[in-house]
């Protein structure tokens, strides 16, 4: 990814990741776990949420992630359901942000505003889609075990390593591009001048 | 204003330190040190303490922890150095000193000491395990490891009190969330007590895969003791890692057994140890 594209994506990345991680923390608090709040994660300060590796990955690989919000499942009355809700809150917040950004783009704003919201529209949609992949550290690795009957909501360390290898295979085999390609084409078709 | 400027300046250094941690050819310690000096945040201090302890040993880590505590007055630092004293050096008395100092001086975030206090309750009379467990379980802002540890200790207390159903309920709650050796052994104990040997075997075999053998044997010994099978408990105790788990210093029933003449005699019969 070149510097121009990286700068183009920067506002969307900062807002997207910050809102995404804050959404996890706020939902966890609503559902009874105040551990993320104690760790300062109920905040819209980007520095509390950006992960160096996840940010770097976005510029190199075209997708990224924030610093994970650590929840305490023992604070949830219904651990599997509440963990699912707190995990899906991140991608859901990105989907909402992406929709709102698209709506603003249809209002034909000033080019600076259009640049910010174009970036927010794309990055948030990509964040929502990529985070549904069942690969740690992405949210999908927490979401899918919660909806599969008989599976525990937490993935053991052994499985995490296996999934990390799967993520690397996805990256280097170009499979991620095959997932993102149709998503990007669809997003372009939604743009006002798409 | 100076604090805010320091915190902002620390941000890129923290990012560099985290990235340096991903590769082997860059020493991240100076970066974490710079990050801590700029931000003076307990969170950065904790990471620096782990780095110093792993690369330079406990003595410089202790000195640094004292300096950090004076600056931050935050129990997060006392908890971090306390965990290092316990996990790396199994030094119960040093752990106790850090906890006591942080409490006596009224440092903030005292709830972060509860995990260490529960560990101490296994060794020292002045720490009441039941009260600490209840305090941990009544809170909803602690780390998952702390809640888990309190639940396991509570389940074991139930087993010792022959409250099998309550112990099993806790084990089921834990196993509904994560695979866990102590919870599997609680289930095993309850199955054994109920005469369900097939079920017991499943839980025992699962538990066995979750810990290194010498550590597992110590945990299993405790459960044999709960079942009233002292001979079996001594067998497992004999095969376990007595030094690594500091079981001889523990005030638990297993600790008492490990220090008993009966166990010494058992060891002599089995061979020198």
Image: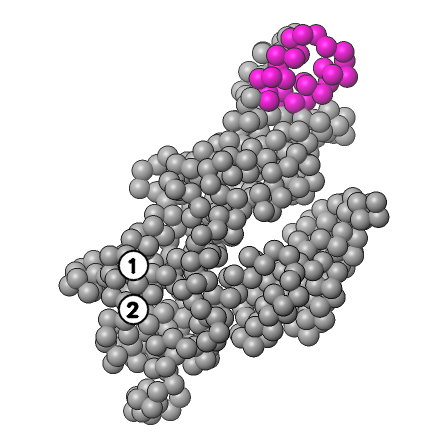
Magenta residues span: A97-122
Quadrant of the rendering where the N terminus of chain B is positioned = top right
Badge 2 marks a residue whose secondary structure is helix
> Which of the two residues, B86 or B267, is positioned nearer the viewer here?
B86
- Vertically, is A32 above or below B80? above
Q: How many marks?
A: 2
> Which of the two residues, A77 or A17, is positioned nearer the viewer here?
A77
Pointer 2 residue: B160
Q: Main secondary structure of the magenta part?
A: helix
Q: How crowded is mark 2: few (under 14 residues within 10 Å), some or many (20 or more)?
A: some
Whether A102 is among the magenta residues is: yes
- Vertically, is B223 above or below A40? below
Q: Residue furthest left?
A: B195
> Sequence-wise, which precedes: disc 2 or disc 1?
2
Q: Please provide percent x and percent y for residue A143.
A: 44, 36
Q: Residues within 10 Å of mark 1 (few under 14, many from 20)?
A: many
Chain of the residue under the numbered disc 1 shown in the image? B
Please give left or right for residue A131 compared with residue B4 in the image: left
* Residues behind callouts 2 and 1 on a single chain: yes
Q: Please provide percent x and percent y for residue B211.
A: 40, 64
The circle drawn on residue B9 is: none
Q: Are marks 2 and 1 in contact (CB under 8 Å)?
A: no
> Which of the two residues, B151 or A11, is positioned nearer the viewer here?
B151
The circle drawn on residue B167 is: 1
Q: How is the image coloured?
A: one colour
Q: Please provide percent x and percent y for residue B31.
A: 76, 55
> Which of the two residues, B141 or A4, is positioned nearer the viewer here?
B141
């Amino acid at each position: 990814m070149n510097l121009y594209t990286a700068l183009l994506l920067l506002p969307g990345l900062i807002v997207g990741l910050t809102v995404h991680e804050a959404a996890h923390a706020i939902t966890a608090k609503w559902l009874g776990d105040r551990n993320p709040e104690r760790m300062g994660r109920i905040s819209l300060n980007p520095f509390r949420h950006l992960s160096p590796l996840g940010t770097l990955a976005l510029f190199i690989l075209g997708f990224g992630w924030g610093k994970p919000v650590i929840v305490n499942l023992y604070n949830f009355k219904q651990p599997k359901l509440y963990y699912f809700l707190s995990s899906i809150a991140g991608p859901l917040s990105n989907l909402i942000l992406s929709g709102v950004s698209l709506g603003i783009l249809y209002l034909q704003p000033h080019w600076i505003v259009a640049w910010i919201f174009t970036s927010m529209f794309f990055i948030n949609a990509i964040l929502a889609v990529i985070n549904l992949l069942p690969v740690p550290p992405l949210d999908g690795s927490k979401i899918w075990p919660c909806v599969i009957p008989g599976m525990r909501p937490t993935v053991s360390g052994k499985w995490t390593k296996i999934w990390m290898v799967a993520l690397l295979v996805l990256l280097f085999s170009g499979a991620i591009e095959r997932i993102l390609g149709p998503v990007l084409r669809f997003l372009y078709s939604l743009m006002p001048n798409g | 204003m100076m604090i805010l400027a320091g915190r902002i300046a620390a941000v890129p250094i923290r990012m560099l330190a985290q990235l340096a941690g991903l590769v082997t050819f860059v020493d991240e310690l100076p970066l974490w040190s710079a990050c801590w000096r700029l931000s003076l945040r307990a969170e950065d201090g904790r990471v620096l303490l782990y780095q110093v302890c792993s690369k330079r040993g406990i003595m410089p880590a202790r000195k640094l922890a004292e300096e950090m505590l004076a600056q931050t007055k935050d129990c997060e630092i006392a908890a971090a150095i306390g965990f290092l004293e316990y996990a790396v050096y199994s030094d119960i008395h040093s752990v106790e000193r850090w906890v006591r100092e942080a409490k006596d001086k009224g440092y903030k975030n005292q709830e972060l000491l509860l995990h260490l206090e529960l560990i101490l309750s296994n060794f020292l009379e002045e720490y009441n395990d039941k009260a600490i467990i209840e305090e941990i379980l009544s809170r909803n802002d602690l780390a998952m490891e702390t809640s888990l540890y309190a639940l396991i200790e509570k389940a074991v207390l139930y087993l010792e009190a022959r409250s099998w159903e309550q112990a099993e309920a806790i084990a089921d709650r834990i196993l509904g969330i994560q695979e866990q050796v102590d919870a599997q052994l609680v289930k095993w104990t309850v199955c054994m007590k109920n005469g369900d040997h097939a079920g017991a075997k499943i839980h025992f075999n699962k538990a066995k895969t979750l810990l290194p053998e010498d550590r597992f044997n110590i945990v299993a010994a405790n459960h044999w003791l709960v079942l009233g099978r002292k001979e079996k408990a001594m067998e497992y105790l004999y095969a376990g890692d007595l030094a690594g788990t500091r079981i001889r210093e523990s005030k638990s029933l297993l600790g008492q057994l490990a220090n008993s003449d009966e166990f010494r005699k058992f060891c002599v019969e089995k061979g020198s140890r």
